[in-house]
Image (tube, rainbow, N blue to C red):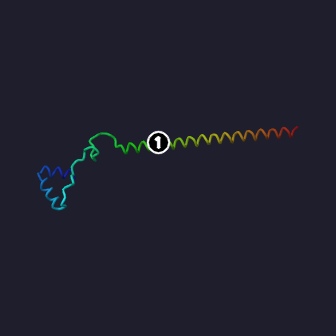
Amino acid sequence: MRVMEDVINEHGLADDLEDCLVHETGNTCFWLGLDDGPGGLDEASDHEDPEAEAKRYADAVHQESVDRQKFLDAVQGALDSRGVLTDLERARMQLEDLRSVGRA
C-alpha cells in the first residue's frame, strides 16, 4: 500500500483518492502513512524489540533452571552410587569375617 501511496502522490491523485474513500466508505479516519512516532509500528530506532529480548532472557533463565536440576540429579546419582559402594564394601567385610570365623 505504501508503494501505491507513493504512485498516487507522484501523479497528484491524493485528492481524488480521498474523495473516492469518502464516497465508498463514508469515512476518512484511516491514515495509511508511516507510523514512526513514539510506540509506532515502524520504529525509526535500531533498538532490539523489547519483547524478543525478554523472551530470550526468560529462555535463558529457564535453561539455567534445567541445567541446575540436571546437576542436582547427577550429584544425587553420585551419592547413591557411593552409598551402594559403601554397602558392598560392608557386605564384603562381613563375608570375610564369616569366613574367618568358620576357619577358626
Identified at 66% across, 39% down, the residue is 82
Camera-nearest residue between 22 and 46: 22
Expressed as whole percent of the image width and height from the top left, the position of residue 60 reads 45, 42
Q: Is residue 13 left or right of residue 39?
A: left
Q: Quadrant of residue 38?
A: top left
Expressed as whole percent of the image width and height from the top left, the position of residue 57 reads 42, 42
Q: Is residue 46 left or right of residue 21?
A: right
Camera-nearest residue between 54 and 9: 54
In the rendered image of this protein, does residue 15 appear above or below residue 104? below
Q: Quadrant of residue 83?
A: top right
Task: Please identify the residue farthest to the bottom as the structure is shown.
Answer: 24
Residue with the mark numbered 1:
61
Q: Secondary structure at mark 1?
A: helix
Identified at 15% across, 56% down, the residue is 18
Identified at 79% across, 40% down, the residue is 94
Camera-nearest residue between 81 and 13: 13
Q: Amino acid at mark 1?
A: Val
Identified at 21% across, 54% down, the residue is 30
Q: How many residues crowd mark 1 within 10 Å: few (<14), some (14–19), many (20+)?
A: few
Expressed as whole percent of the image width and height from the top left, the position of residue 33 reads 21, 49
